[in-house]
Image (cartoon, rainbow, N blue to C red):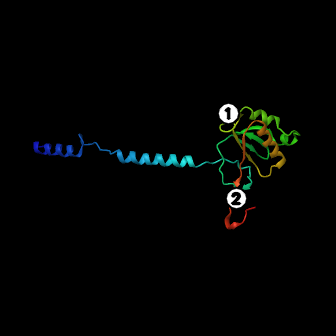
Amino acid sequence: MSLRSKAIRKRILRRAGRDEPGAIGLNLVPMIDIFTSLLIFLMLTSTTVQTLRTPKSLTLPLSASAQPPNDTPVLTVSSENITLQGEVVMTLQQAQADSNAILADLKNRLMLAPLVTVQGEDSGNLTRGEINIVADRAIPYALLKKIMATCGDAKFARISLSVNRRSMIGGGENP
């Protein structure tokens, strides 16, 4: 190779920004911009979506409520068991057979939740916060009333009942 061709080759490589012939340059700025945009998009969409998993064995009642459920402890009442955060507390037969207005086994499990101080008007009072009840629509109201009374007796300040949102298509109501 002549001296002149070596000089030309060196100049071409220098202009290309490479010091060795096999290296490939990589511009990271567009990739970082894309990842930043993707990260912001995922952060925004993940905070607005809130889903509450309902077991397939439950059929929730319909309601016209537009308020979404909060992220709280979940008390599930199926056709067989009453579970708190996925752990079985008692069977439905035990709950229906109990003649008391407060279910003792359920209350004992609910009392394990920590107490927090109420903010606002009633500051200084203690409560366990909120609880969300997910119950099958075939559960008798009397049993549901016992469960809600037990939650209230365990110092849960807000008790929510999960329902499916009723669609108002054509102005009629779904069964």
Type of amino acid under label 2 = Arg
Q: Which secondary structure, mark 2?
A: loop
The Cα–Cα distance between marks 1 and 2, rounded to whole angstroms, is 34 Å
Percent across and percent down for residue 157 are 72, 40
Q: Quadrant of the N terminus?
A: top left
Percent across and percent down for residue 19 are 23, 40
Q: Using the image, tell me which numbered label, if any, was put on residue 68.
A: none
Type of amino acid under label 1 = Val
Q: Are the residues tagged 1 and 2 within 8 Å (C-beta)?
A: no
Q: Residue at x 66, y 54 (%)?
A: 66
The residue carrying mark 2 is 166
Percent across and percent down for residue 130 are 69, 40
Badge count = 2
Q: Residue at x 75, y 34 (%)?
A: 109
Percent across and percent down for residue 170 are 68, 68
- Circle 1 residues within 10 Å: few <14, some 14–19, many ≥20: few
The answer to which of 50 and 3 lies nearer the viewer is: 50
The answer to which of 146 and 76 lies nearer the viewer is: 146
Q: Which secondary structure, mark 1?
A: strand
- Circle 2 residues within 10 Å: few <14, some 14–19, many ≥20: some
Q: Quadrant of the C terminus?
A: bottom right
* Quadrant in which residue 133 is drawn: top right
The residue carrying mark 1 is 116
Tag 2 or tag 1, which sits nearer the N-term? 1
- Check the image and name the residue furthest to the bottom: 170
- Direction from residue 122 to residue 50 in the image, left or right: left
- Direction from residue 40 to residue 88 in the image, left or right: right
- Direction from residue 51 to residue 4 in the image, left or right: left
Rendered view: 135 above or below 111 = below
